[in-house]
Structures are given as C-alpha cells and as structure tokens.
Amino acid sequence: MTKPSIYHSQGYNCAEAIIKSYNEEFNTNIPVALGSGMGTGMTVGSLCGAVNAAVLVASFIKGRENSDSPNEARKYSKEIMNKVREQYNTELCANLKSNKVSCGEIIDFSYNALKEVLKNA
C-alpha cells in the first residue's frame, strides 16, 4: 500500500492522494476525481482537502442512498473531525500551514484517522 503522502509527492493533491490510497488498500473504486477540487483547502485555504477527502471516503463507505435510512455517515464524519481538531486545533488548510503542519503530515494523519474510525465501525 502506498502512503497518501507519497502520492501527494507524485503530484496528486491531498484529497486525491487519500482517495487513491484508500482504493488501493481496500479495493474500492471511489473516483479519484472527486478530490480534484479539494486541494489547498478548496484552493482558498478553507477545509483541508485531506480532511475533506477522509470524510468523503467515510461517507462513501457508510453513507445512505435514501432519506428513509438513518444518516450513519455523520457519526464517522464527526469522529474524523474531532480527531483532527484534537491533534491540530484546526481543520483549516491556511491555519495548518501557519502552524507549520506539513501537507504530508496532515495527509497521513487524516488517512490514519479515517482507517481507525472505519475499523471501529
């Protein structure tokens, strides 16, 4: 399995790298293109693309297909967000960069948080 930070160093943005690694490790087929607009905090320093992609993957795995079903994905989204906030006190790309958190670090942290949250599902 290739770590998402390695894919990032090969030219994938942070979100694409998370999706690509997840597909590889868990034999899923989530379109990598879903992450293409998420990098660098949706290009404006907002929600970190890696964090956003972790939530996107959790939603793909645990989400619902109709409004009659309970929305279980929210629970996983909250757990991922709380792990990021607990570790870094922010999920915003611009703030992470200001705090000297490297892209590789937050990418791998978000990916590991995703796997941990889904493992406990």
Image (cartoon, grey):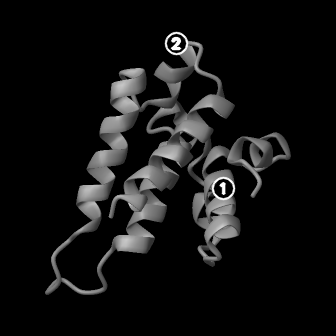
First-in-chain label (1 vs 2): 1
Q: Which residue is mark 1?
A: 16
Instruction: Tell me whether the residue at label 1 lies in contact with that at label 2, contact meaning CB atoms closer than 8 angstroms.
Output: no
Identity of the residue drawn at 61% across and 40% down: 108
**Residue 29: image tag:** none
Q: Position of residue 8 (x, y in %)?
A: 75, 44
Left or right of 51, for residue 101: right
Q: Which residue is mark 2?
A: 99
Q: Amino acid at mark 1?
A: Glu
Q: Is residue 110 above or below residue 33?
A: above
Quadrant showing the C terminus: bottom left
Identity of the residue drawn at 65% across and 24% down: 102
Q: Position of residue 1 (x, y in %)?
A: 75, 58
Identity of the residue drawn at 79% across and 44% down: 6
Disc 1: CA contacts within 10 A as few (<14), some (14-19) or many (>=20): many
Left or right of 100, for residue 46: left
Q: Amino acid at mark 2?
A: Asn
- Residue 15 visible? The answer is yes
